[in-house]
Structures are given as C-alpha cells and as structure tokens.
C-alpha cells in the first residue's frame, strides 16, 4: 500500500483556486452525508453573522454519489449559491494541504462505517465539528465538537461558535494532537493490513468499542484499496 506524496499547500491553493479562508467538508455527495442540512445550517450562520464577521465560503470536496442532484441544488434553495462551492473529486495528494488550509472542517454525516475524513482533518491540524450520530463520537472522542446532525439550528450555532472563537479552535487542535499519538503501527504488508482493517470493520458492525485514535492519515487510502469502498 504505497502512500502518495502530498502536494504543497500553496500549489493546492492555486490549482483549486481556493479563497484565503474557507469551511471544508469532504465526502461523496449522497444523502447520508447530510449535505443539504449542512448547507441550510451554513446559510443560517451566514445570515446570523455580523457584517464584520464575514463567514467564509463553504467548500465541499467529493464526487457525485446517488441522489446527488438535491445536494447540488441546495445552495440555490437556501440562497447561498454564491458562497458554497462543490470541488468535485479531489486527488488524495491534495487532501492534506486542503485540510491544513481550512479554517474549520464540518462532518455532519447521518451514518458512517469508519468516519475517516474527520480523522484526516484532525491529523492535519484542522479543528473538527462532527455529527453525534453513528460511530463518530466513539472514533473522535474529545477531539471534536459534536452536534445533532438532524438539528439545523444546533449545527448553525456550532459553525458560528467555532468560527468566532480562535481559542476554542486551538483547543480542539490540541486535543486532536493528543488523540492521534501513535498507539499501533500499520503493517506494511497487504495481508496484515487486511486483517487489521477487517477486524476493525467487524468490531464496528457488532457495535463493540474500538479506538481509532491511533489511525494515521495514510489509512484512508488503505481501507479504500482493501475493501474497494468510497468515502
């Protein structure tokens, strides 16, 4: 399982034409990712913010999945078509810098098997606002701020809270650094990696507690290769 060398941040900024500040979410465009509620909540946050606060644009990176059309229509439906941008599929080599450049990473998913994008964001020093649903609280622990993914008001308020409070963002960065201290070494061979990923997958399906705090950012590509799955 080879790793891809990350592209430098300023090169990624130029290639994707990124703004100076932005809120980021990453994942395939499909209903379980809860993007329509995220965009609705973002629209409420943008309207609630004082003129001096200037809520940064929302960027969503991910290829089209099933029922993606309603997600693409959401910025227009909620009146923020000029503030929300879909980046489409972003190469794996761009992701580390994309996370580093983001002011805030938001992951409001309704269901996740692993919840790897927020772990990747944490690994690159980006504060994370995540859904309290599914396995995410167990996986992310105290290193993320959690909200009810079905509550637009709560999600909107949390976005504003983290954008307004630099010290709170730094608190979650520090917690992420502590959470991501290596506790296991991912083996180099595919056979050993299959065994580790398969066990984690089965433990999650059985709702048995597990600690993914030791997972490194390279595991994302590994799991996609082993299980032939998408985010």
Image (spheres, rainbow, N blue to C red):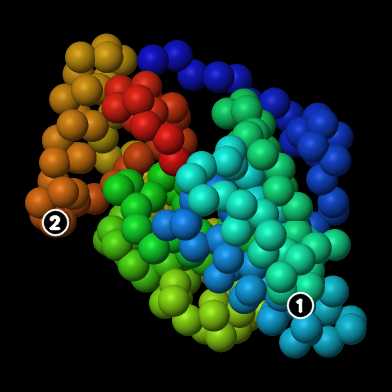
Left/right placement of residue 208 relative to residue 173 reads left
Residue nearer the viewer, 68 or 110: 68
Quadrant of the image for the N terminus?
A: top left
Residue nearer the viewer, 91 or 104: 91
Quadrant of the image for the C terminus?
A: top left
Q: Measured from the top left, where is residue 183 in percent x and y?
A: 27, 40
Residue farthest right in this picture: 52
Numbered circle sitting on residue 46:
1
Where on the picture, by quarter, is residue 111? bottom left
Rendered position, 129 above or below 148: above
Q: Measured from the top left, where is residue 49 in percent x and y?
A: 78, 84
Residue at 14%, 41% (x, y): give it.
202
Q: Secondary structure at mark 2?
A: loop
In space, the residues marked 1 and 2 are separated at their CA atoms by 37 Å
Dot 1: few (<14), some (14–19), or many (≥20) neighbours within 10 Å? many
Left/right placement of residue 76 relative to residue 206 reads right
Residue at 34%, 53% (x, y): give it.
112
Any part of residue 120 in sight:
no
Rendered position, 102 above or below 83: above
Residue at 37%, 22% (x, y): give it.
225
Rendered position, 89 above or below 84: above
Residue at 67%, 54% (x, y): give it.
72
Q: Please say if the residues under marks 1 and 2 sit with CB atoms less than 8 Å apart.
A: no
- The mark that comes first in sequence, 1 or 2, is 1
Left/right placement of residue 181 relative to residue 200 reads right
Numbered circle sitting on residue 207:
2
Q: Measured from the top left, where is residue 216 in percent x and y?
A: 41, 36
Where on the picture, by quarter, is residue 227? top left
Residue nearer the viewer, 29 or 168: 29
């Amino acid at each position: 399982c080879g790793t891809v060398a990350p592209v430098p941040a300023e090169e990624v900024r130029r290639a994707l034409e990124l703004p100076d500040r932005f809120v980021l979410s990453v994942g395939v465009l499909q209903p379980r990712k809860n993007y329509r509620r995220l965009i609705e909540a973002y629209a409420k946050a943008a309207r609630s913010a004082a003129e001096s606060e200037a809520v940064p644009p929302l960027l969503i990176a991910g290829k089209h999945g099933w029922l993606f059309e309603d997600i693409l229509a959401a910025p227009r439906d909620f009146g923020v078509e000029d503030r929300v941008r879909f980046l489409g599929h972003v190469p794996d080599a761009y992701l580390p810098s994309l996370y580093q450049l983001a002011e805030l990473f938001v992951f409001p998913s309704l269901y996740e098997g692993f919840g790897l994008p927020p772990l990747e964001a944490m690994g690159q020093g980006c504060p994370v606002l995540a859904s309290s649903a599914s396995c995410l609280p167990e996986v992310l622990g105290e290193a993320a701020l959690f909200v009810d993914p079905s509550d637009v008001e709560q999600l909107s308020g949390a976005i504003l809270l983290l954008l307004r409070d630099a010290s709170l963002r730094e608190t979650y960065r520090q917690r992420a650094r502590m959470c991501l201290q290596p506790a296991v070494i991912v083996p180099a061979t595919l056979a050993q990696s299959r065994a580790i990923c398969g066990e984690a997958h089965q433990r999650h399906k059985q709702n048995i507690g597990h600690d993914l705090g030791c997972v490194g950012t390279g595991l994302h590509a590994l799991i996609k290769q082993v299980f032939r799955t998408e985010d």
